[in-house]
Amino acid sequence: MEAYAVLETGGKQYRVATGDTIEIELLDAEAGQDVELDTVMAVSDGNELKIGMPYVQSAKVTLTVVGHKRGKKLINFKKKRRKGYARRVGHRQELTVATVKAIA
């Protein structure tokens, strides 16, 4: 079994292993910069699983920022029949593409 961690960032949870590339909500970091996240909810070394309440003490995940991009466009459409009401709003989320460097 391989080592993995469950981390929380941007209000979402991600299961990551070393070498994985993930798209997370925008981080304030330049491309090529390393970022340490300490909001690790669970960590496994391959044999033992540690679960935090809510976070595991002294557990960190190091990410290397590959770059930034924008997600696909999502459309929110509301309509009330027979009332002449229709509303359309588009949204594109700013994302950070990062590679997991280490789990500690």
Image (cartoon, grey):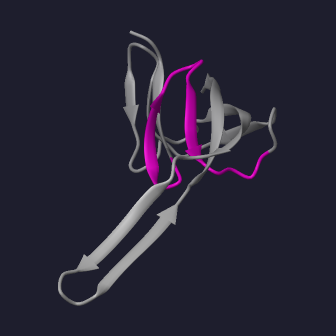
19 left or right of 11 in image: right
Rendered view: 70 above or below 43: below
Q: Residue at x 52, y 47 (%)?
A: 72
Q: In front here: 90 or 3?
A: 90
Rendered view: 78 above or below 33: below
Residue 75 coordinates in the image, percent (x, y): 42, 61
Residue 70 coordinates in the image, percent (x, y): 62, 48
**Displayed quadrant of residue 2:** top left
- Is 45 within the magenta? no
Q: In front here: 44 or 98?
A: 98
Q: Is residue 103 among the parts visible in the rendering?
A: yes
Q: Is residue 59 among the parts visible in the rendering?
A: no
Residue 54 coordinates in the image, percent (x, y): 41, 50
Rendered view: 83 above or below 98: below
- Is 20 within the magenta? yes
Magenta residues (range): 9-29
